Amino acid sequence: MAKYKCTDGGYQPNEHRPTIKTKSKVEGFVCAGFNQQQIATYLDISVDTLYKHYKKELTETHMNKTMTLSNAVFKDALSGDKQQREFWLRTQGKWANAKPREEKERDEKILTLLEQLAQKL
């Protein structure tokens, strides 16, 4: 096997070279939920090569995008957006604005009885 002298940043001939475009694509695929095998297949590289050249994109992208979106939702919630406030409370505050089915049925029975009682008075 021939030995190559690396003269262009440490890459061997025919070795995959990440670009801004491929890094952006990997970030997009990660956010869309594609797995590493699917991303590697799209780029026509192995999973090992994908991880070697795109470790940061694979490990940090989803977290960073989620944080950015979460900050936007939080900002909207603080500025008075009722829907965003409720969303934030349901997802982050473990708040529920809907009662379990059993409680709803019980409450409906109580209301029905109260209405019937009120009609008799």
Image (cartoon, grey):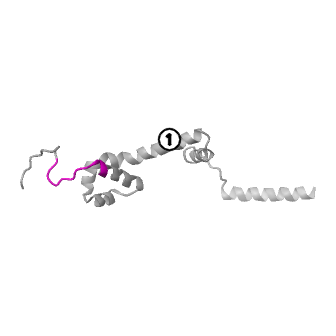
Image coordinates for residue 1, horizontal then vertical, percent: 6, 56
Task: Inspect the image, locate mark 1, and give the three-letter code of the amino acid beneath it.
Answer: Asn
Q: Is residue 93 magenta?
A: no
Tally of numbered discs: 1
Q: Which span of residues is magenta-colored? A: 11-21
Image coordinates for residue 71, horizontal then vertical, percent: 50, 41
Q: Nearer the viewer, residue 95 or 51?
A: 51
Kindly give the residue lying farthest to the right in the view shown: 121
Residue displayed at 46% across by 43% down = 68
For label 1, the SS is helix
Residue displayed at 33% across by 56% down = 36
Give the side of residue 91 with respect to residue 15, left or right: right
Image coordinates for residue 27, horizontal then vertical, percent: 36, 50
Circle 1 sits on which residue? Answer: 71
Image coordinates for residue 48, horizontal then vertical, percent: 25, 54
Give the side of residue 52 with respect to residue 116, left or right: left
Up/down of 65 relative to 111, above or below: above
Q: Where is the C terminus found, in terms of image quarters?
A: bottom right
Magenta span dominant secondary structure: loop
